[in-house]
Image (cartoon, grey):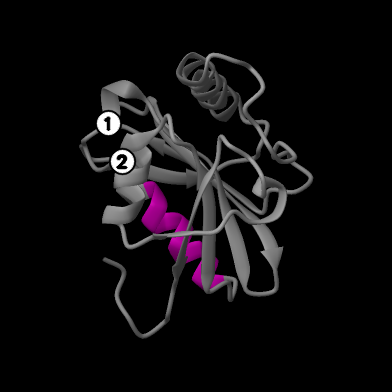
Amino acid sequence: MTCTIEPRPWDDPDGAALRAAQRTELDARYGTGDHEPGTPPSAADIDLFLIALDADGAPAGCGALRRLDATTAEVKRMYVTPAARGSGVSTAILRALEAAALDRGWTTIKLETGPAQPDAMRFYEREGYHEIPLFGAYIGSGLSVCYERTLTLSSPLP
């Protein structure tokens, strides 16, 4: 699928709809609405929010970056609509987030997913991320699995 990736404000209506769909899916997977171990992302702490649009201009996915320190960012709210899964949209969003991180001098990307999301775990592993110990607010969470990837300017993205 051909898609266009655009930066949008956190409160963009398409972004809000995508995040609501993600929340509904996670509630169904985890059987509870209480599956966010850390502080939920907000306009105040998200440095970049991207939306993928399909060829017809419909929202197909989203992802965000939250800065953790001078060289590290966390991927937040990575989500692709069921209709767009398996089409390359998730990879396009992730690569755009990684390129934006490098532009900002952030060379380490961390993220959190969960054991009820084996599809996400396989995706991140395929894309060069490796599992790491739980970090930050995720320490001690039974619902979290964390990953990391080091980016370099000289090496191509997978």
Q: Secondary structure at mark 2?
A: helix
Amino acid type at circle 1 is Arg
Q: Residues within 10 Å of mark 1 (few under 14, many from 20)?
A: some
Q: Quadrant of residue 149?
A: bottom left
Above or below, 34 against 89 in this view is above
- Label 2 near label 1: C-beta < 8 Å? yes
Q: Residue at x 42, y 56 (%)?
A: 96
Q: Residue at x 32, y 81 (%)?
A: 155
Report which residue position mark 1 lands on. 85
Q: Of tags 1 and 2, which is closer to the observer? A: 1
Report which residue position mark 2 lands on. 89
Quick one: quadrant of the C terminus? bottom left
Amino acid type at circle 2 is Val
Q: Quadrant of residue 128?
A: bottom left
Q: Is residue 148 left or right of residue 104?
A: left
Principal secondary structure, stretch drawn in magenta: helix
In magenta segment, residue 54 = no
Which region of the structure is painted magenta? Answer: 93-103
Q: Secondary structure at mark 1?
A: loop
Q: Is residue 37 left or right of residue 27?
A: right
Above or below, 15 against 120 in this view is above
Position in image of residue 57 (x %, y %): 36, 29
Position in image of residue 11 (x %, y %): 68, 31
Quick one: quadrant of the N terminus? top left
